Image (cartoon, grey):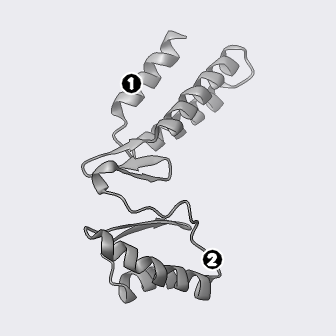
Amino acid sequence: MDKFDWFIKKDLKIKYYFRYADDFVIVHSDPLYLKKIICPIENFLNAKLDLKLHPQKVQIRKFRQGIDFLGYVVLPHYTTLRTKTKKRMFKRIGFNKIMLDKGLMSEDGFNQSLQSYYGMLKHCSGHKLKLKINKSIKND
């Protein structure tokens, strides 16, 4: 557990918190509590890690609205791929398919890329998207 995790979990006693590198989310039922802890978090980041919170990225919102985090939208009962991420994924798969058909990409390269996207879909409710991808690459 690093300094920041220790601060969040032990000092602030935050139960529902997740993080990847320098991105983090804190989930709590009381919006006033969330507003109250912004200042101590900012002070800790600045003093101990020489970091600052991005002013446009600090949001307090209802969990049912979803949390946009690392290319996914986390909702109370499921996680989905962010729309922008989904569009980029389909665009890239289409481009790779064209490159494969023209002989400018190997079958192995195409399959590795495809497996990477399938791996992304394992972290969310992505079964229907996987079916859509399979249909799109067979129809071309």
Q: Looking at the image, which residue is at 75% across and 21% down?
A: 104
Question: Looking at this view, is 12 or 106 the one in front?
Answer: 12
Question: Where residue 11 sits: x, y (%)?
Answer: 39, 89
Give the residue type that dot 1 points to.
Leu
The answer to whether one can see residue 68 in this image is yes
Q: In which quarter of the image is residue 27?
A: bottom left
Asked which secondary structure carries label 2, the reply is loop
Question: Where residue 77 sits: x, y (%)?
Answer: 24, 49
Asked which secondary structure carries label 1, the reply is helix
Q: In which quarter of the image is residue 17?
A: bottom left
**Image side of residue 112 versus residue 32, left or right:** right
Question: Where residue 64 sits: x, y (%)?
Answer: 28, 51
Q: In which quarter of the image is residue 7?
A: bottom left
| Residue on which the image places disc 1 | 131
Circle nearer the N terminus (2, 1)? 2
111 in relation to 137, above or below: below
